[in-house]
Amino acid sequence: MAPRKTTLALIFAAVCVAVAAAQEREVRRKNLIGKAPRELVGEKTDWLGKSPPRVLAELKGQVLWLQFNF
């Protein structure tokens, strides 16, 4: 019986951790809604077109492709 109780306890703990993580992501997402995005900062030097924009305001109204390589 003891191994079964241990297994159930581990499953319960894993579910609790997953629920807490989901709640934390939701709180962080809600904190970003309605706020201006952070400026794009990076080492990219080969932009298509003209020189890279210095602030996001220069990109307003334009199509923007963001590619993340991890």
Image (cartoon, rainbow, N blue to C red):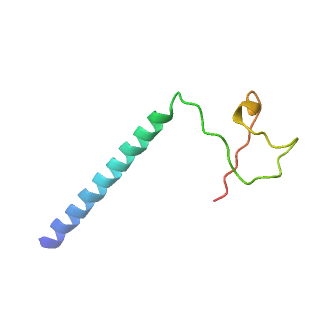
Q: Residue furthest left?
A: 1
Q: Position of residue 38 (x, y in %)?
A: 60, 39
Quadrant position of residue 66: top right
In the displayed image of the protein, which residue is found farthest to the front?
A: 54
In the depicted structure, whether residue 33 falls above or below residue 17: above
Front-lying residue, 30 or 39: 39
Residue 41 percent location from the top left of the image = 68, 47
Residue 62 location, quadrant: top right
- Tag count: 0
Quadrant of the frame with the C terminus: bottom right
| In-image side of 36 versus 60 (left or right) | left
The residue nearer to you, when weighing 17 against 44, is 44
Question: Compared with residue 41, is residue 57 higher up or lower down, i.e. above or below?
Answer: above
Q: Which residue is drawn at 80% across and 52% down?
A: 45
Say left or right for 70 vs 10. right
Nearer to me, 12 or 69: 69
Residues 68 and 41: in front is 41
Q: Is residue 2 above or below residue 51?
A: below
Residue drawn at x 67%, y 43% as measured from the top left: 40
Is 42 located above or below residue 33 in the figure?
A: below
Q: In which quarter of the image is the N terminus?
A: bottom left
Where is residue 21? Give x, y as percent.
37, 49
Q: Where is residue 37 in the image (x, y as percent from the top left)?
A: 60, 35
- Which residue is rendered at x = 88% and y = 41% of the image? 50
